[in-house]
Image: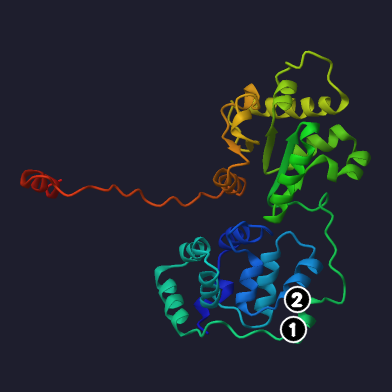
Amino acid sequence: MDRETRLGTLSTEAKYLLALKLNPRSSGTQSNWVDLAEELGFSRDVNLNIERLTERDNVFDYLMEKWEDLRLASLPRLVKALDEVKRPDCVYIIQESLSDAVWRKVMEECKRIPFPLPSIPDERVWPRIFDPQPFTKPNTTTIAMTRSIYLSYHPESQKFAGEIAKHLESSGLHVFIDFKFRKEREEMGDRQWREQSLGKATKILALCSPKYKAVCDESTGKKLTQQETTVKLEYEYIRNDIIANNFINKKMLTVYHSAKTKKSSIPQMFINYPPYQWSNAREREDLDYALWDVKKYEPPRVIKRGPPKTIKEDFSRKNK
């Protein structure tokens, strides 16, 4: 195996993007890490046990680690498998992270790889997957996370917030959401926990709804409940931060549920920040890229021109 085409040569950014694409458990019609693992030779039983035992959000990254442990991993094999499961978007991520010379080597080796890849015997995988000590989740309050998201939402949107949190965690993001940190809030105090988490978060995602807007814009017309007061506290912290930075806040993002509620959901202070519609699959993907601070690939625009109608027109086109 050529040193340049080893899996280890793949950049960290490329691995993050692949995990973002392949981690979700339910990707609709698109293949995910389970389909990829089967193409790489892992059995369905192994895949189920990987998911059950790792207790990690980034399952794709864990799968790649185990594949490397078995000394079977290479970029050509990964590209070939991704092509088989019809994920050209993931192949493109790998291509963009490599130089042209290395990519040509990968393509040449792909042609020599017999497919499908031979199955990996379960007994060869089990000792490497089943660690003697069960994996325990680290204490997320004491470890500095590289990429963390704070979710601000109205109490009545808790189900919607839970759905978004689950999606973000499956992509490898750490999520600060109040109902998952009850113990920490009791120990530190609710206000201190919120202010500290808002300060630590890489991004702040406001889940906008009509009631969220009413609380933030003080247009409820009635006394706020205790839970709504915490929403107001979050909003004031974010607003003060926006004002202190001359209304430029790269941490702030907003999401709303559907097009019908867009105008009635976004608070006045957040109007200038990009809103994302959660029910729209394309905007949901755009939000993922924004949360990772990764620029989405946009193919160059192709201008289609019809055949020239006259000789004069044909001559003018050639001379442009």
Marks 2 & 1, CB-CB < 8 Å contact:
yes
Q: Residue 217 at what x, y percent from top left?
A: 70, 19
Q: Residue 103 at what x, y percent from top left?
A: 44, 71
**Badge 2, how many Cα within 10 Å: few under 14, some, many 20+?**
few
**Which label number is shown at residue 45?**
2
Q: Determine whether the residue tagged by mark 1 lies in a helix, strand or loop.
A: helix
Q: Which of marks 2 and 1 is nearer the N terminus?
A: 2
**Which label number is shown at residue 122?**
1
Viewer-closest of 248 and 278: 278
Residue found farthest to the left: 311
**Direction from residue 177 to residue 110 in the image, left or right:** left
Q: Residue at x 46, y 62 (%)?
A: 96
Residue 219 appears in the rendering:
yes
Q: Which residue is drawn at 74% across and 82% down?
A: 125
Residue type at mark 2 is: Asp
**1 above or below 167?**
below
Q: Residue at x 75, y 76 (%)?
A: 45
**Foreground label between 2 and 1:** 2
Residue type at mark 1 is: Asp
Q: Residue 146 at what x, y percent from top left?
A: 69, 52
Disc 2 to disc 1, C-alpha distance:
8 Å
**Badge 1, how many Cα within 10 Å: few under 14, some, many 20+?**
few
**Direction from residue 194 to residue 89 in the image, left or right:** left
